[in-house]
Amino acid sequence: MDLGFFLNWNLTNNISLLTEVHYVQKGLRYYLPIVENSQNDNGVSVYVQSVNPNVNYLSFPVFIKYDLLKSEVIPYLIGGMRVDFVLSTSEINSPRWLYNNVNNIDFGGSIGFGFQTKSLLGIGTGLEIKYSLSFIKVASSPMAEITNRSFEISFILYE
């Protein structure tokens, strides 16, 4: 989940600086095998537990946006860096070792493309597709190392 706001600072006719702030929830799903000794038949029983940990962030991306052409529909390229600060974690059905080792800051980058127009709904609308990745490990332990990667599709409203 991602909810955010942005400001577009025009630097030249085709290049602008985008500063943004977002509330972002990042999560994963993995299956943890559980092995238990059975008292009844002196055997071992194995089952799988689904684990869905989430981390909530306040994210501050800064992007360079390059408009490919000026027309009714403006296609553009976008790229830049972001810094995410952990707000909270959801620990339901998640192992404690995971959250004990989460870094409070995540640093990464994003690249993508999009388009914007004012003619679709009478107000500014757009669609943006980005790929984002972390440059640092979000969490690590002897059991696992976790990094963030995401493919994002955003619907944009602006004035």
Image (cartoon, grey):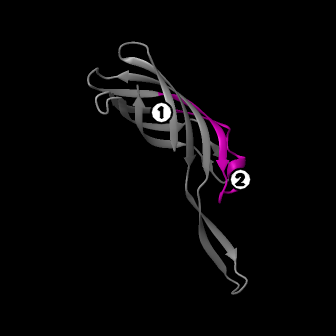
Q: Tag count in the figure? A: 2
Q: Out of 91 and 103, give the one closest to the viewer.
A: 91
Q: CA distance from mark 2 to mark 1?
A: 29 Å
Q: Position of residue 32 (x, y in %)?
A: 61, 63
Asked if residue 105 lies in the magenta stretch, the reply is: yes
Location of residue 112 (image quadrant): top left
Residue 7 on the magenta span: no
Work out whether residue 35 or residue 25 is closer to the camera in this orientation and state it.
25
What type is the residue that disc 2 sits on? Trp
Above or below — where is 102 with respect to 13?
A: below
What residue do we see at 67% from left, 40% from top?
103
Is disc 1 surrounded by few (<14), some (14 to 19) or many (20+) residues within 10 Å? many
Q: Which numbered disc, 2 or 1, marks the residue that appears first in the sequence?
A: 2
Which residue corresponds to mark 1?
110
Task: Report the front residue among 42 and 107.
Answer: 107
| Secondary-structure class at tag 1 | strand
Q: Residue at x 55, y 56 (%)?
A: 29
Q: Which residues are magenta?
A: 80-109
Q: Residue lying farthest left? A: 71
Picture quarter with the C terminus = top left
Crowd tier of the residue under label 2, counting other residues whose Cα lies within 10 Å: few below 14, some 14–19, many 20 or above? some
Image quadrant assignment for residue 125: top left
Q: Which mark is residue 97?
A: 2
Residue 55 seen in render = yes
Residue type (three-letter) at the residue carrying disc 1: Ser
The numbered disc on residue 82 is none
